[in-house]
Amino acid sequence: MGSNSRSLLQSFLEVVNTLAKNLQNGTLELVELARGGVSLDDVGYVVRRNAPVLVLWCLFVFVIARMCCGGRGSRKVKTRENYEPGKVYLHQHVPASGLPSLSPFCLKLEMFLRLADIPYENVYKSLGMEPGPKGKIPWIEYNGRAMADSGLIIQFFKEELEIDLNRTLSTTDRAISRAFVKMLEENTYWWGLVYFRWIENFDVIGSLFEVGWFMHNVLLRRAARGLSKTLWAQGIGRHSPEDIYAITEKDIMAVSEFLGEKPFFMGEEPTEADATVYGFMAEILWAAPESSDLYALVTEKCPNVREYCVRMTRRYWQDWEGLADKC
C-alpha cells in the first residue's frame, strides 16, 4: 500500500473513531440523565446537541452497507400477480435502431427463447428504469418467479423444460462451444462492444439509442464515465485504441474461421452457441457506425459473419420488421 493510500486510510479511520466516540459520549450522557430522573427537556437538549453526530453515524452505516451489499446478490422485485402459466415475461431495454435490443445479452436471451420455441412476451424498460433481481437487464418472470442473468436463465430452462439444443454435439464440441461463448461474453464484449460503443463512439450513441440531448449528454455520459472507470480497473482502458482493436479483431476472426461455411455456428443444426454468437455479432454488424473499423471487420474481412447474421435473421426474426429490413 502506497503512502497516499495509507494516509487516506488513516484519515478515514480517525473520522470513524471520532464519530464513534461522540456517539458513545452522547449515549452515556443520556444514560446518566435517565438514572438521575431528569426532565424531558434536559434529554431533548442532549439529543439535539448530538443529533449531527447521530445523523453522520447513520449515514456512515448506510454507505458501508451499500458498499458491502448494494448491487450484490439478489433483491426482491415485484412480479405480476396475473401471469400466464408457462409464459416468459422478458424484461429488457426498449428496441432502438431497428434492433430488438442494444444489449447483446438481451438479444442472446431472446434468441435462445426463439431457438427453443419457448413462448414469451417482452416487457420493455426505458433507460434508467429499475433493473431486475441482480441489478441488471435482462431478467424474466416465469410462473410468478423472478430470475436474472441470461446464462443462468438459459440453464434454468434447460433443466426445467428438459431442453438441450446441444444434444447433437460431442463432448469435445460442447467444450468448444462453451469456450467461444465465454470468449464473446467475457472478452469481446468489453473490448469490442463496450469500448467502441461507449468510449470511442460516444458522440453518436445518442442517435443509436434514439434519445434526446438531455439523455445523451447527462444520463448516458454518466454511464460512459462509469464504464470508463470499469475498463481502466480491468486493464482494458489502459491500452491504446490500436491495441484494443487488434485484440477484438482476433476474437472476431476466430469466430469467422470456426464458422466457415456452416449454416449454424456448430454445424448443420442450431445449438445453444448460436444464441450468443448471433446476439453479439448482430450488435457489431448493425449497431456499429458504418464508418468504423469494427463494422468493416464484420463486413469486409469476415463477410461470412455478416452472411450468418442475415441468415439467422431471415429464419428466426421475420416478425421483426426493423431487423428484417437490415438484411
Image: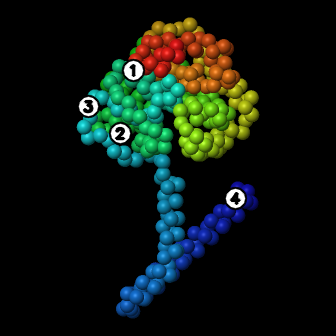
Do residues under tags 3 and 4 come within 8 Å of each other at their CB atoms?
no
Query: Which numbered marker is on residue 84?
Result: 3
Image spot of residue 159 (x, y percent): 35, 27
Which residue of the protein is positioned furthest toward the front in this rendering? 213
Lower sequence index among marks 1 and 2: 1
What secondary structure is found at the residue carrying circle 2? strand
Q: Amino acid at mark 4?
A: Ser
User: How many marks are shown on the rendered structure?
Assistant: 4
Q: Quadrant of residue 83?
A: top left
User: Which callout, 4 or 2, points to the residue nearer the camera?
Assistant: 2
Q: Amino acid at mark 2?
A: Ala
Q: Amino acid at mark 1?
A: Arg
Lower sequence index among marks 3 and 4: 4
Q: CA distance from mark 3 to mark 1?
A: 18 Å
Lower sequence index among marks 4 and 2: 4
Which residue is the site of mark 4?
5
